[in-house]
Amino acid sequence: KDNYNNVTSALASKMFSLNEIERNKIIVITEGKTDKKMLETAWSKLNPNLECPFKFISSGIQIDEEHRTGNADSVRRTIQTLSTFFSDLKIIGLFDNDREGYEQFNSLNKEIFEPRDFNCYHRKHLEKNIFGVVLPVPEFRQQYININSIKQRYFVIEHYFNDAILQQYNMIDEPIINGVSIFEISGKKNNFSQQIQDLDVNEFNSF
């Protein structure tokens, strides 16, 4: 909180420094640097001959993006702050669909964002093209969320990969509930976000 003014100034400065091509893209603020890397890789795998319409930026206050330690709270603060600076940019704050992510998505300021709807994955700013979005859950991971609950949610971006891939790269933690095939992600996320560049395009279908 003591650094709030410095942080908001740095965020605004970064947005003002975008070139014209970047300013015309949809800016996606991710929880962390590994989410950013996975989304960039997924786009390039699925659309190898198309320019990406998104500009991915990881949240966090560190200048060097490789060392940023963003989270759901920093995504929420970032898009709320940017909404006071810009009216022309298209911005998405992307939250994991786990307890922390959904709580922050739910906590977007109700005076400037649409009300929450448990059946909707996004909330739009009332006047600007700024959105809070929680990760949509594919059919094969539906057991990871209770659509009527904020607390019973466990889905993060790595869960878009199937169990076999996550097992191969040692990303599977112990089951959250005994007898239920719901697990959290463990392991070295930074390494995993780089190793997926070697995967076949079919492994990215859920993205």
Image (cartoon, rainbow, N blue to C red):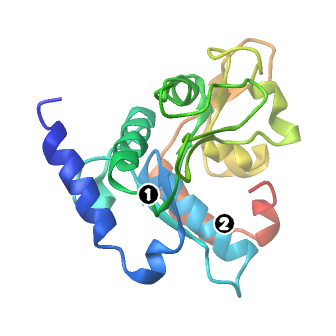
Q: Residue at x 45, y 73 (%)?
A: 23
Q: Position of residue 62 (x, y in %)?
A: 23, 52
Establish if 67 lies above or below 137.
Answer: below
Q: Secondary structure at mark 2?
A: helix
Q: Residue at x 62, y 26 (%)?
A: 115
Q: Residue at x 33, y 44 (%)?
A: 69
Q: Tell me which corner region of the image, top left, top right, bottom left or bottom right, holds residue 98.
A: top right
Q: Residue at x 71, y 88 (%)?
A: 49
Viewer-nearest of discs 1 and 2: 1
Q: Tell me which corner region of the image, top left, top right, bottom left or bottom right, holds residue 86.
A: bottom left
- For the C terminus, the image quarter is bottom right
**Amino acid type, mark 2:** Ala
Crowd around label 1: few <14 · some 14–19 · many ≥20 (10 Å): few
Q: Residue furthest bottom?
A: 49
Of 142 and 112, which appears nearest the observer? Answer: 112
Q: Residue furthest front?
A: 127
Establish if 165 lies above or below 64.
Answer: above
Badge 1 vs badge 2, beta-carbon distance below 8 Å: no
- The number of numbered badges drawn on the structure is 2
Residue 207: assigned label: none
Q: Position of residue 10 (x, y in %)?
A: 21, 55
Of 7 and 98, which appears nearest the observer? Answer: 7
Residue identified by numbered label 2: 42
Residue identified by numbered label 1: 87
How far, Cα to Cα, is label 1 from label 2? 29 Å
Establish if 193 lies above or below 103.
Answer: below
Of 185 and 34, which appears nearest the observer? Answer: 34
